[in-house]
Image (cartoon, grey):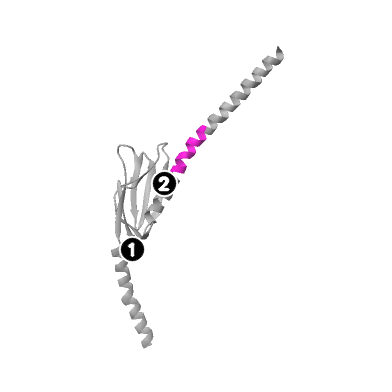
Amino acid sequence: MFEAVLAVMVTAICMSVLFNVTQALAVSKKRMRSENALAFSYIQLEKYMHKDAKRVYLKSCSNSEAVIGKIHKDGTEDSFAMRKTKTTGRLYVVSYMELLPALNVLFQRKGNNLRIMVTEPDCRTSNLYFALDPPPEEKEQHESKKGPVDEKKETKQNEG
């Protein structure tokens, strides 16, 4: 009789330990899932931006939307927008993909860099940074300004 009671108690303790371990694993998976989703979204967006692209630049940026211009290797130009949906609360690229769930998304431009500030559903804040190329007009003007300066240096060297 004593052995039967002891066996039932040991079985109950083992079941309790297994239950607690499975609960701990389930909670840890939920916490890790959002970090992985954010990293995966960043990688996915980076690959999409630079796929078959000669130049990727920021066309316009406001707090609620960023428009990215893309010049393909064959010379054709394309653009896409990123914004947060109001109904589902997800950051998405227009006509391409939904990226991740977010409570709040803000876009900031600093020079040719794009910063996306994402407040996740568990109230953590993350920043995604993208270094982009200068727009075509700025790059062409910058190169044309360099041209005459280089020629003047060459003529001074030839004279002296």
Report which residue position mark 1 lands on. 74
The disc at residue 89 is none
Residue 59 seen by the camera: no
Is 52 displayed left or right of 59 in the figure? Answer: right
Q: Which residue is depicted at the point 47% across and 39% down? A: 33
Give neighbour class at mark 2: few <14, some 14-19, many 20+ (Cα, 10 Å): some
Residue 81 belongs to magenta span: no
Percent coordinates x, y for residue 13 in the rendering:
62, 22
* SS category of the residue bearing label 1: loop
Q: Which residue is depicted at the point 30% across and 72% down? A: 144
Question: Quarter-wise, where is residue 92 in the image?
Answer: top left
State the separation of the CA atoms marked 2 and 1: 27 Å
| In front of the other: 2 or 120 | 2
What's the amino acid at mark 2? Ser
Image: magenta residue range: 26-37
- Residue occupying the far front of the picture: 74
Percent coordinates x, y for residue 67 in the rendering:
30, 52
What's the amino acid at mark 1? Asp
* SS category of the residue bearing label 2: helix
Q: Which residue is depicted at the point 36% across and 80% down? A: 153
Q: Nearer the viewer, mark 2 or mark 1?
A: 1
| In front of the other: 92 or 31 | 92
Question: Quarter-wise, where is residue 73 in the image?
Answer: bottom left
Question: Quarter-wise, where is residue 8 in the image?
Answer: top right
Report which residue position mark 2 lands on. 41
Labels 2 and 1: the sequence-earlier one: 2
Quadrant location of the N terminus in the rendered image: top right
Residue 17 seen by the camera: yes
Percent coordinates x, y for residue 10 in the rendering:
66, 21
Quadrant location of the C terminus in the rendered image: bottom left
